[in-house]
């Protein structure tokens, strides 16, 4: 099984976030087993994102949020499935809060204002489906 490479040179700073990347590749290795909660680490005072797969019809990413870190309000033109894989978080959609913990998921509808509030450190998978919105 594969797990994340923890070398400091694998971190790429992008604006106000640190994104963990595999040199020369922005996706996970195909046809290999991965322990999803281990492919991404927590970084102090940061949100970390790793692309699992990226296609023209959608993306799957895994993210880690350190204590106190979240995502500000935004909207997306696509449906997004958020699944907590470690810890707890509050996801607010159209001003309605939902409290999720490990194993819980929620669909964020296209064009719905949303933001993510942490409840300590947590990791999640985001799946964005672009098909059908052309």
Image: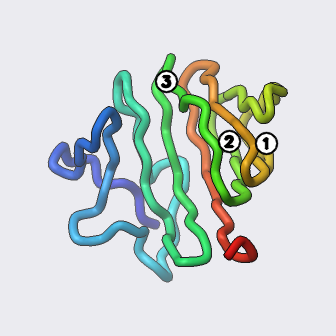
With respect to residue 80, does 121 lie above or below? above
Tell whether 64 sits left or right of 18. Answer: right
Q: Earlier along the polypeptide chain: callout 3 or callout 1?
A: 3
Work out whether residue 65 or residue 129 is closer to the camera in this orientation and state it: 129
Query: How many tags in the picture?
Result: 3
The residue at 49%/64% (across/down) is 52
The residue at 69%/48% (across/down) is 82
Q: Which mark is residue 70?
A: none
Q: Count neighbours of disc 3 (C-alpha within 10 A) and say few if under 14, some if 14 to 19, many if 20 or more.
A: some
| Residue 71, percent from left and from top | 54, 32
Tell whether 32 sits left or right of 126. Answer: left
The image quadrant that residue 46 belongs to is top left
Q: Earlier along the polypeptide chain: callout 2 or callout 3?
A: 3
Report how far apart the C-alphas of labels 3 and 1 lie in the structure.
19 Å
Work out whether residue 54 or residue 94 is closer to the camera in this orientation and state it: 94
| Residue 64, percent from left and from top | 49, 38
Report how far apart the C-alphas of labels 1 and 2 lie in the structure.
6 Å
Camera-near label (3 vs 1) is: 3
* Callouts 1 and 2 close, C-beta under 8 Å: yes
| Residue 59, percent from left and from top | 56, 66
Under circle 2, the secondary element is strand
> Residue tagged by mark 3?
69
Q: Residue 84 carries which label?
A: 2
Q: Earlier along the polypeptide chain: callout 1 or callout 2?
A: 2
Q: Which residue lies furthest to the bottom in this view?
A: 31
Which quadrant is home to the C terminus?
bottom right
> Residue tagged by mark 1?
104
């Amino acid at each position: 099984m594969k797990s994340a490479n923890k070398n400091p040179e694998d971190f790429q700073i992008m604006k106000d976030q640190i994104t963990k990347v595999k040199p020369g590749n922005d996706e996970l290795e195909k046809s290999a087993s991965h322990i999803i909660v281990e492919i991404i680490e927590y970084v102090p005072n940061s949100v970390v994102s790793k692309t699992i797969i990226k296609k023209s019809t959608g993306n799957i990413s895994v993210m880690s949020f350190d204590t106190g870190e979240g995502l500000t309000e935004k909207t997306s033109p696509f449906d997004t499935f958020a699944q907590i894989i470690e810890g707890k978080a509050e996801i607010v959609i159209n001003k309605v809060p939902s409290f999720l913990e490990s194993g819980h998921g929620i669909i964020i509808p296209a064009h719905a204002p949303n933001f993510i509030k942490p409840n300590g450190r947590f990791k999640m998978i985001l799946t964005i489906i672009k098909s059908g919105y052309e």
